[in-house]
Amino acid sequence: MKKQAIKLLLLCFVIAAFSIQVAALVPEQVIPMGKTVGIQIQTDGLLVVGFEEDETTLAKTAGLKEGDLITHINGEKVTTTEELRQILDAGFSGDLTMTVQRKGKTAQLCIEKETLETARKLGIYVRDSMAGIGTVTYLDPENNTFGALGHGVEDTETMVLIPLAEGRIVPSQVVDIQVGQRGRPGALKGIFDTNTTIGTITSNTSYGLFGNSDKLQGELMPVDVADNEEIHEGKAVILSNISGDQVEEFDVEITKLFPEESNGRNLLITITDEELLEATGGIVQGMSGSPILQDGKLIGAVTHVLVNDPTRGYGIFIENMLQANQAYSSAA
């Protein structure tokens, strides 16, 4: 994960918007996974995650905000902090223009040459990549596509969905667990094999990470995908990888359904498995994406933990994940 301070000056504005259409076709069967992987993402530009402690910075007064994505300077694409540093160090013979994206809209920022020469240079913090551990939910054996997490990868400081330039998944091993406690979420701690790529990430969406892999290996045969209407309150199981690279099955109870929700909170689950409760305290970070099965069908994936009660959390319907994968694949 990179976060560096860059000296920068900004001014002015112009706006445009975009939209995405949602597709509905989903596969009838997929392989439930439950395997943790290392996730590495390169941002599609530079994400502004903070400012140096100076309330009079030109960056702020000109309108640059946390969560903005810097994509171009004077028409030149920037994707890494080093590229940005080289552009700034080279200097400018004229006005500076900068293209940023904000909440799906494009803004053109500019600053006149005279201001560049006389104004103080003030700092912003930007991020160009992220890395972490997460769980693969399913693999579609028909086309080697996968879905993971059940929610998007967001910047931890701005809570902005990371715009994806490229990404990959790598093998991981769970080596330790920070046990979840009331008011303090736990976490799986893993190590990555960064020399081996087992899949490419093609989209980072609010419904999960999606990509392609011909190297993921599931421990189960394909199972039927449940329609949203088939899911019901009652007993279910999740598949999770809480030690080494071993996937295990644990008992849960689905206590409430929220079929109209579109934020990865379609069902409320309670961990009832004593072994899992003893090992993790319940749901912990890194378990996002753990497949949920009921009546022999894949019904969803774990997405969130309740901070004040780690034995409970939320999950997304699998049909919603698969539809999102289809939609973003079609739009690509």
Image (cartoon, rainbow, N blue to C red):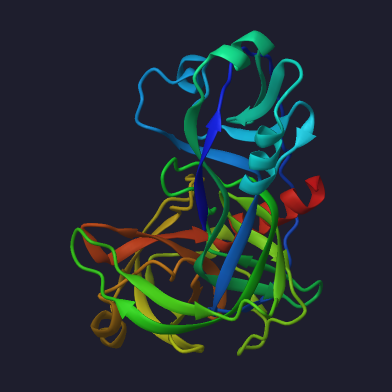
Residue at (49, 45) in percent of width and height: 260
Residue sticking out furthest to the left? 182
User: Whole-percent x and y of residue 47?
Assistant: 56, 40
Residue 288 lies, in percent from the top left, at: 46, 66
How many numbered discs, if any? 0
Residue 78 occupies quadrant: top right
Front in this rendered view, residue 295 or 209:
209
**Image point 52% across, 66% down: which residue?**
300
Q: Quadrant of residue 182?
A: bottom left
In the rendered image of this protein, does residue 170 appear above or below residue 43?
A: below
Question: Residue 126: x, y in percent?
Answer: 53, 41
> Which residue does the image show at 48% across and 32% down from the upper left?
123
Q: Is residue 193 left or right of residue 18?
A: left
Asked if residue 201 shows in the view, the reply is yes
Q: Is 166 situated left or right of 174 in this image?
A: right
39 vs 284, nearest the viewer: 39
Nearer the observer, 21 or 307: 307
Q: Where is residue 200 in the image (x, y as percent from the top left)?
A: 72, 66
Task: Give the vertical position of 49 relative to 131 (above or below).
Answer: above
